[in-house]
Amino acid sequence: MKQYILAIESSCDDTSAAVLDEDFVCLSNVTASQNVHKQYGGVVPELASRAHQQNIVPVVDVALKNANITRNELSAIAFTRGPGLLGSLLVGVSFAKSLALSLNIPIIDVNHLEAHVLAHFVKDDISQSVPDFPYLCLLVSGGNTQIIQVNSFNDMQVLGKTIDDAAGETIDKAAKILDLGYPGGPIIDRLAKEGKPTLEFAKAHIPDYDYSFSGLKTSILYTLRDKLKENPSYIKDNMNDIAASVQKAVVDSLLDKYEKALKKTKINTIAIAGGVSANSLLRERFVALGKKYNCKVFIPKFTYTTDNAAMVASAGMFKLKNNDFATLDLPAYAR
Ligand code: KG4
């Protein structure tokens, strides 16, 4: 009998459920986003967990319907155990446990960051090519910036990471200063297309493959403050150029370190993952980097860049094939 896995992702503000078959082909991937946070300029944890509670049953229902399978055909249920917002995670973890218990099938815990990295194995059709191990993954999300050497699905080595803020956080912060709304990444990306990177910001000097973005955040704030002193409508008059400058500064920082790690490891398969990997400049420059070093390049489909359950199902399917199951007393973890 063919194996199917249902996965649930509820680590932040997206309630998502997906079904993958044993060949990693995605049969469904359904996400309910929570608009309730927009008015607060960021995710409000208590509101997020309440919205997950409302969304989880219909989202799982639609995921099973779209996949055209019944609950009884499932072989296992995977869920994001952490890291994330504890209240949000608890909804997904408890739901996965109860459903698995009622169906008498195993549960599989998945680390959210590993799921982002393994999103590259989700196939929309069986012939789609996937990375060979090892590959060098740049993981860039709202809360994380890491360079990871992926030796296998369960052997990942973090070569570098941010010592303070993440790349996504930096872009979101810049968008907040510019009064652009949340999340700022997609808006900055859109505006940057119409602008030129005319502003230079301070660069961090951190050893090895680690990142630091807090200096860049401060530099953006101070540069704009000084410009506003000279011209009170500077931001309004130069919005596209500011967006292009912020985007370039973040992408430059990301790729400087990544290229250094690539040279050192000499790995010839490269990938990007996480919400910020939706950024058009980063995608373009990453492809160019791959060409320069003659690498096979993997860029995720937009649907698999931000939080989604298909990537959780992918990590879960590896574990299912390895008979690596969790027990019902396993708690969620925030960090
Ligand atoms: O991976 P993700 O959905 O959430 C975390 O698990 O953190 O990433 C969200 C981040 C946000 O900071 C958002 O602004 C950023 O990804 N983002 C982008 C773009 N789309 C989303 N950043 C730059 N350009 C984009 N097109």
Image (spheres, rainbow, N blue to C red):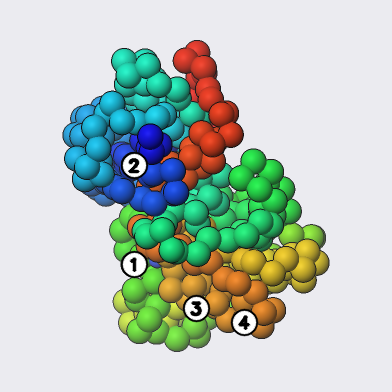
Q: Residue at x 66, y 48 (%)?
A: 152
Mark 3 / mark 4, whichever is N-terminal? 3
The residue beneath circle 1 is 187
Mark 3 or mark 2, earlier in chain: 2
Can I make out residue 47 in this image?
Answer: no
Look at mark 4 in the image and give the residue it sits on. 291
CA distance for labels 3 and 2: 30 Å
Q: Earlier in the sequence, mark 1 or mark 4?
A: 1
Query: Cα distance, mark 1 to mark 2?
Result: 31 Å
User: For the point 69% across and 43% down, which residue is it?
Assistant: 155
Where residue 191 appears, as percent x and y from the top left, is 35, 76
Q: Nearer the viewer, mark 4 or mark 2?
A: 2
SS label for mark 4: helix
Where is residue 36? Give x, y as percent.
23, 42
Three-letter amino acid code at the position of disc 3: Glu
Q: Which residue corresponds to mark 3?
A: 284
| Residue assigned mark 2 | 19
Please state which of residues 37 and 64 is positioned toward the viewer in this rendering: 64
Q: What amino acid does circle 1 point to?
A: Ile
Q: Which comes before the other along the chain, label 4 or label 2? A: 2
Determine whether the residue tagged by mark 1 lies in a helix, strand or loop.
helix
Q: Nearer the viewer, mark 3 or mark 2?
A: 2
Q: How many marks?
A: 4
